[in-house]
Image (cartoon, grey):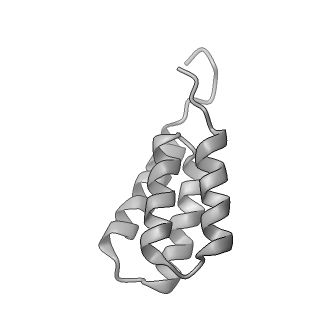
């Protein structure tokens, strides 16, 4: 299944430029990136949010999900 990655990436870039300290906006951005299977970008956004709110459990779970997604990506197209 091929997903459209342009929309989540665009939203993420817009969020980081317009609201870099808004943790809720970063959470929404990371969530959209996860849905779009953009695990590396989702991890980066979650880590940025954690710098602003290190005790936020939702952000910690988002980062964990993004990291897990990176580990589960097949290395070969036929896998």
Q: Residue at x 55, y 82 (%)?
A: 21
Q: Using the image as rendered, state which of residue 4 and residue 68 is in the foreground.
A: 4
Q: Position of residue 22 (x, y in %)?
A: 50, 78
Q: Using the image as rendered, state which of residue 73 and residue 12 is in the foreground.
A: 12
Q: Is residue 42 above or below residue 71?
A: below
Q: Residue at x 53, y 49 (%)?
A: 33
Q: Position of residue 62 (x, y in %)?
A: 41, 60
State which quarter of the image contains the C terminus.
Answer: top right
Q: Position of residue 38 (x, y in %)?
A: 58, 45
Q: Residue at x 63, y 69 (%)?
A: 16
Residue situated furthest left in the rendering: 57
The count of marks equals 0
Residue situated furthest top in the rendering: 78
Q: Is residue 59 above or below residue 77?
A: below
Query: Left or right of 7: which side holds 34?
Result: left
Q: Position of residue 27 (x, y in %)?
A: 44, 65
Q: Using the image as rendered, state which of residue 60 and residue 75 is in the foreground.
A: 60
Give the quarter of the image for residue 31: bottom left
Q: Residue at x 56, y 29 (%)?
A: 3
Query: Left or right of 39: which side holds 58?
Result: left
Q: Is residue 26 above or below residue 43?
A: below
Give the quarter of the image for residue 48: bottom right
């Amino acid at each position: 299944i091929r997903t459209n990655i342009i929309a989540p990436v665009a939203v993420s870039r817009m969020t980081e430029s317009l609201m870099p300290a808004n943790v809720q906006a970063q959470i929404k951005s990371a969530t959209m990136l996860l849905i779009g299977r953009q695990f590396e970008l989702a991890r980066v956004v979650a880590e940025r949010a954690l710098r602003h709110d290190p005790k936020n459990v939702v952000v910690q779970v988002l980062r964990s999900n993004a990291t897990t997604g990176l580990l589960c990506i097949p290395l070969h197209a036929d896998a």
